[in-house]
Amino acid sequence: MKSIKIIEICSELGAAQLGASMGPDAIRMAAHKAGSDFFSKYPTIRLPDRNYLLSNRQHNQGCSHVKRLRYILETCQIACNTVAEVLEQGEFPLVFSADHSSAAGVIAGVKQAYPEERLGIIWIDAHSDMHSPYTTHSGNMHGMPLGSALGLDAEAREWLNTKPNPLPLATQKQWTHLKELGGISPKVQPQDLILIGVRFFKPEHSILIQQLGITLYSVADIREQGVALHIEQINQQIQDCDRVYVSFDVDSLDCHTVSFGTGTPEPDGLYLSEAIALLKSIVANPKVCCLEISEVNPVLDNKGNAMGEAAWQVLEKIT
């Protein structure tokens, strides 16, 4: 790669709580406070958002099983094209996103740039984000980016032995469009997806992971067996992949010690030092072609800008 290019996606239409649109700026402010010139060294693209729709009740309704899919699809299409263009120019897209729904577009962009290559995904998160409109309980799209990348549909409900959510035809078409962004669906095969730190499970989450045969490394496993062993296992699993996309959701961090400002905090997460050690080793693999940092929400941060500062520490150490 020639150099880093920063892509900021401030859309928060897929989140459960407001404020994540300020996440990229919170990381930028933390870097400035630390005296770093990181954000002046690399060019930045800030994608347009439609967050003003959040104040419009009409746009917030739609299908009860998936909120604002039409507009999130637009955001993901722009993200897809932007990421693909950056990669095609030989640069490394470093993505700062508000809510995690935009990851569907980022992953699509990587596949659009490398359509013939095998993609691996390393997903560091408290949640598996493998829902679809057919299986979601909340309707929030930040819980569906991996569902989109895996091409999940109503058949997932068959594994769960429950009926899929009934969707209007327009919503079904929009979900199909999202899955097919970049011209390829699915984007990743289950054996090439690695979950790290996922610990919030409803019964269907565990069933989906088991049915698809997806690798999951728990926080307890990493803490007990050590980062080095898991990095060795991760590198073995992705050895047949040509490119690797890495997603770091800050809610993967422990909410009692560091993850104060994020929309869906969970206890028993990674310590900051563990996250840094993991990510430093992961991004050292030359197959890694894109890194996304997501879900910093300074509005919910009861420790000032602690979450932005923690994300900046991670970023500083791994770049």
Image (cartoon, grey):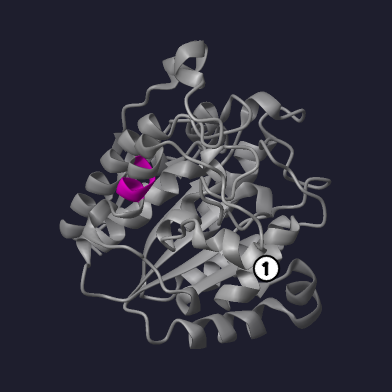
Residue 71 is a magenta residue: no
Give left or right: position of 271 versus 12: right
Give left or right: position of 151 versus 302: left
Give left or right: position of 101 versus 170: right
Identify the residue under disc 1: 207
Quadrant location, the C terminus: bottom left
Report the front residue among 100 and 201: 201
Tag 1: residue type? Ile
**Residue 306 to residue 106: above or below:** above
The x and y percentages for residue 104 are 40, 50
Q: Residue at x 33, y 43 (%)?
A: 173
Residue 43 seen in the figure: no
**Residue 82 to residue 108: above or below:** above
Q: Residue at x 32, y 53 (%)?
A: 93
Q: Which residues are magenta?
A: 174-178
Residue 175 is a magenta residue: yes
